[in-house]
Amino acid sequence: MKIVIALFCTALFSLTAYAGNGEGRATAMGPRVTCELPNGSVEYIPSEYCKAYKGKILYWN
C-alpha cells in the first residue's frame, strides 16, 4: 500500500510541475512582448525576435 501511495504522489507532483512549465510568458527567445515592427504592424512575439526585426517594444506583458 505504501508503494501505491508513493507512486500516486510522485505522479501527482510530476504532473503539476509539467503543467506549470509552459505558461506562455517566456520562451528560449525571451519573454513575449508587444512589438511594433518597422512596417507598422504590432505583433505579440518574443523580445529577441523584436530586436532582430529592428522593432520597438511597446510594453512588456
Image (spheres, helix red, strand yellow):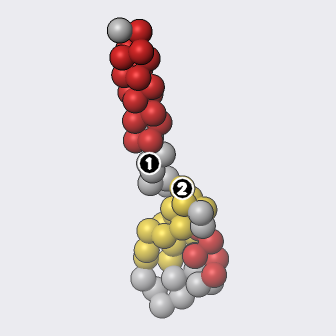
Task: Tell me the CA gap for discs 1 and 2.
Answer: 8 Å
Give the secondary structure at mark 1: loop
In this view of the protein, can residue 58 be seen by the observer?
no
**Amino acid under disc 2:** Ala
Q: Position of residue 5 (x, y in %)?
A: 38, 14
Give the secondary structure at mark 2: strand
Q: Position of residue 59 (x, y in %)?
A: 54, 61
Label placed on residue 23: 1
27 shown above or below 41: above
Identify which residue, 6 or 26, lies in the foreground.
6
Local packing at callout 1 (Cα closer than 10 Å; few below 14, some 14-19, many 20+) is few
Quadrant assignment, res 1: top left
Identify which residue, 41 or 8, lies in the foreground.
8
Q: Position of residue 25 (x, y in %)?
A: 49, 53
Q: Residue furthest top?
A: 1
Identify which residue, 16 or 41, lies in the foreground.
16
Which residue is located at x 36 percent, y 17 percent?
A: 4
**Amino acid under disc 1:** Glu
Which residue is located at x 59 percent, y 84 percent?
A: 53
Q: Is residue 54 left or right of residue 33?
A: right
Quadrant assignment, res 14: top left
Label placed on residue 26: 2
Residue contact between numbered discs 1 and 2, judged by CB atoms under 8 Å = yes
Which residue is located at x 45 percent, y 25 percent?
A: 10
51 shown above or below 11: below
Local packing at callout 2 (Cα closer than 10 Å; few below 14, some 14-19, many 20+) is some
Q: Position of residue 21 (x, y in %)?
A: 48, 45
